[in-house]
Amino acid sequence: MKPISKYVRIGQLLASLKQPDYRYRQITDAIFKHRITRFEQMTMLPKSLREELGRELGEHIPSITPILEKSSSQVHKVLFSIDAGERIEAVRLSYQRGWESYCISSQCGCGFGCRFCATGTMGLRRNLTADEITDQLLSFHLRGYPLDSVSFMGMGEALANPQLFNALHLLTDPQLFGLGHRRITVSTIGILPGIQRLGDEFPQVNLTFSLHSPFDEQRSQLMPINDRFPLQDVLVALDHHIQKTGRKVYIAYILLRGINDSPEHAEAVASLFRGRGAWEHLYHVNLIPYNSTDATPQRYESSDRSRVNRFVQILKSKGIHATIRTQFGSDIDAACGQLYAAEQ
């Protein structure tokens, strides 16, 4: 049986108690406009209703609890406790222009075992519910932070969790989080059914594909998912996604020193996206500095600046849109899964 979100349960409870329709709006306004964290504090409601809400849904509005936090100048990382003693992570990124962006988790752990990823060493503990996904954002919102944009680039593979789509409905609901579709980014290692469903149900949500090597054999070594969903099949699905949505697809490429950062790799990446038809200009490569971690069996290092610059120069010389992403939070174990490991 699929878990029902707290917002649906609130609506059902109000209906069963024959409450007037405006009560639901009062409750959602209390949470999202007035940042009230407990039902008992919603004094605009009858006391009996506040007590019933507390009994049915718990004392605290968020279902997750922050237990460990780390901050640097532009990054605030939080480890949350969820049911059964498990842990998940979320990160707030503060940009100098005043923009607040969030990186949230979709699973506790991850079962796909990318060799360079700290979270992959945990294995998959379980999928998160829609509430556990959205409560990461709610926790920041209730502290007074604006919700400008969100990316599913935390722990887990978002498109492997069917609850992602329920979470997207909550995040874009104008009575709840009210996020614009284009302010949400879903990252995937190449889950083909999920890519198709995202294009069908949320065509304006941004899609990022994690590439990390243009060579099939090497990509399979780094990312075993490549054996199940081969690179060329994923690229065809991305072509269809762009044709259907008219939206850019972002290509994430983590640069690992001496592994995937050679000029030959850059040439091969460029070859992947040249000649893909009238939509090839809608592919954009984001080159990402690697956050080193001791959690993985093999230790990887980030590329030096000269190799990064050479890589992006080659891409641009071939007509590929490319950006070197700013690195945040390396001083607070910003790699996915590192705060979890430190707490353990």
Image: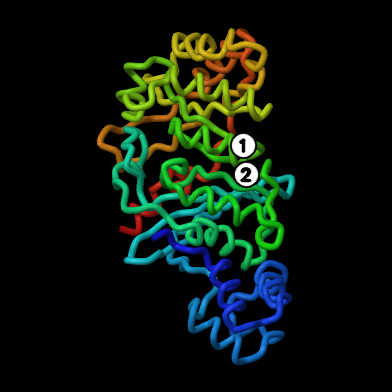
| Residue 156 position (above or below residue 20) | above
> Crowding at label 1, few (<14), some or many (≥20) Cα neighbours within 10 Å?
many
Residue occupying the point 65% across, 17% down: 279
Image disc number at residue 314: none
Residue 135 visible in this rendered orientation of the protein: yes
The quadrant in which residue 190 appears is: top left
Please give the residue where the numbered disc 1 appears in the rendered image. 206
Mark-to-mark CA distance, 1 and 2: 6 Å
Q: Residues within 10 Å of mark 2 (few under 14, many from 20)?
A: many
Q: Name the kind of residue labelled 1 in the image.
A: Asn
**Secondary structure under the numbered disc 2 in the rendered image:** strand
Which residue is at 52% across, 76% downward? Answer: 60
Q: How is the image coloured?
A: rainbow
Question: Which quarter of the figure is the C terminus placed in?
Answer: bottom left
User: Which residue is nearer to you in this view: 43 or 73?
Assistant: 43
Q: Which residue is mark 2?
A: 184
Residue at image coords 60%, 48%: 150
Where 63 falls versus 313 (above or below)? below
